Amino acid sequence: MAVAADVGDERAVAALVESAISAYGRIDALFNNAGIIDDMALPADISPELWDRVLRVNLTGTFLVTRAVLPHMLRAGRGAIVNTASEAGVRGGAAGAAYTASKHGVVGMTRSVAWAYAKDGIRCNAILPGATLTGIADGATFDPTGAARLSPVLALGDQLARPEQMADAALFLASDAASFVNGAIVPVDGGWSAG
């Protein structure tokens, strides 16, 4: 079942979660994968509007959907949450300022949820994709200075992942095969972060 929703809107998220509960009666797993990029602008150059938009989707959206499913998981006494962070969420500033900040926030939130709800049977982990063949950059306009500074870093990761490879990692973390994995921040980047 597909439901369109703005993850940065609390009412839309509530309706989304209610749709899942109405259709299936429970929520066993959540994969927070909605995300957008910024224009790779340097911190002095990014507009407050773009900053707010990126954090609203990437970080606030992850928070709102997680918060909405937690009561259902708590009632069930179990659940698995998987968040999509990014290599930018642990490697520092080799991406736009807003995107990097949002993904650092997702890493921190993942660890916080993992710790807070471990005794309630709820696990929370994150994957750190490297460069992946998705439509996230379709139609994006990049700041020339920021993009030029980023290009040497991107050259280090010349291997692009398929979306299915991210999904496989998320599926493992959401499954009972990962029943004792909690608070893990897992690179899924073909070895890019090892270099």
Image: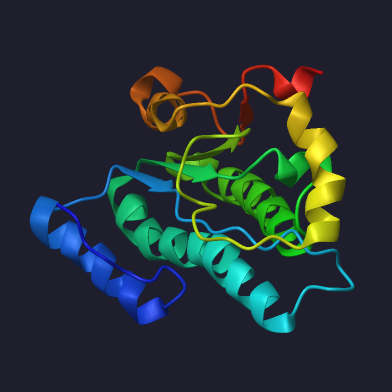
Would residue 110 be visible to someone looking at this image? yes
Q: Is residue 195 left or right of residue 180?
A: right
Task: Tell me which residue sits at (26%, 49%) in the image.
Answer: 27
In the image, residue 129 sits, relative to residue 81, either above or below, namely above
The image shows residue 193 at horizontal and vertical percentages of 75, 25
The residue positioned 60% from the left and 45% from the top of the image is 85
- Quadrant in the picture for the C terminus: top right
Percent position (x, y) of residue 48? 73, 82
- From this view, report whether residue 192 is shown above or below residue 20: above
The furthest residue to the left: 23
Can you say whether 140 is above or below 191 in the image? below
Front position in the image: 78 or 15? 15
The residue lying toward the viewer, choosing from 107 and 88, is 88
- Residue 176 shown left or right of residue 93 in the figure: left
- Pick the residue in front: 176 or 139: 139
Question: x and y percent of residue 188 in the render?
Answer: 58, 26
**Residue 148 placed where, x, y %?**
83, 49
Q: Residue at x 86, y 58 (%)?
A: 145
Q: State the residue in front, 186 or 73.
A: 186
The colour scheme used to paint the residues is: rainbow
